[in-house]
Amino acid sequence: MSSKTLPDTVIRKITGFKYGHVAMALSPDCHTLYSFGRRKPRSILNGGFTIERKDGPFYTIFNETECTIYELDVTDEQFMKLNVILDYIAYRMHTFNYDYLGIVLRYFHIPVSFKRRYVCSFFVARLLRVSGIYTFPKPDYYVRPADFELIPDLKEIYTGKYRDYQCDAVI
């Protein structure tokens, strides 16, 4: 995702990738996203686990956010594991924080991982690995937004403004 905010712009400049943020949805409509980022739309310093909603405060303010949405087939067991993990984290969401220090240290190739501290790509990579869906060929904390495009069998289903995405899936 690219919201064109200052942090997003910095991340995109450093990585050279078109998006500075990743999130995970568990339903085809992508109305609810799970990630690590700002807890309040106007504050970049209050970061941590977020449950982002398409009609929520962040995407209401940053309604020009662009994205590419991918679909990945998972087993029922993998899906259940994702739900259990996300329920656990959501219940304790304020004990999980954004990893400001770690993102700087990892930029300088210092391999660090702090307990209950993540950035968006590290978090989604960890979710995929722990649930048995996909393991990147590098530590989770080194995974960047661009790496997700390399997952085998990933299907691109939409590119455009997040607010304009309409789910065509029939469940």
Image (tube, helix red, strand yellow):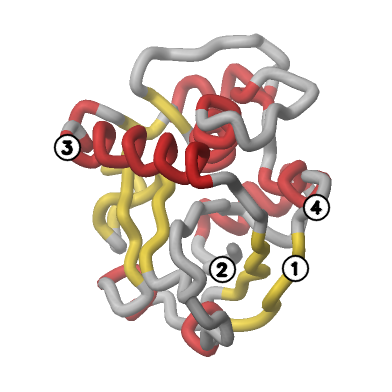
Q: Earlier in the sequence, mark 4 or mark 3?
A: 3
Q: CA distance from mark 4 to mark 3?
A: 32 Å
CB within 8 Å, label 2 to label 4: no
Q: CA distance from mark 3 to mark 2?
A: 30 Å
Asked if residue 10 is positioned above or below residue 100 in the image, the reply reads: below
| Residue 85 relative to residue 79: left or right | left
Horizontal and vertical percent position of residue 42: 29, 61
Q: Which disc is residue 153 wearing? A: 4
Horizontal and vertical percent position of residue 14: 73, 43
- Looking at the picture, which amino acid does disc 4 mark? Asp
- Looking at the picture, which amino acid does disc 3 mark? Tyr
| Label 1 neighbour load within 10 Å: few <14, some 14-19, many 20+ | few
Q: Nearer the viewer, mark 4 or mark 3?
A: 4
Q: Nearer the viewer, mark 4 or mark 1?
A: 4
Q: Mark 3 = which residue?
A: 91
Q: Nearer the viewer, mark 2 or mark 4?
A: 4
Name the quadrant containing residue 168: bottom right
CB within 8 Å, label 1 to label 2: no
Q: Residue at (26%, 72%) from the top-left corner? A: 57
Q: Mark 1 = which residue?
A: 156
Q: CA distance from mark 3 to mark 1?
A: 31 Å
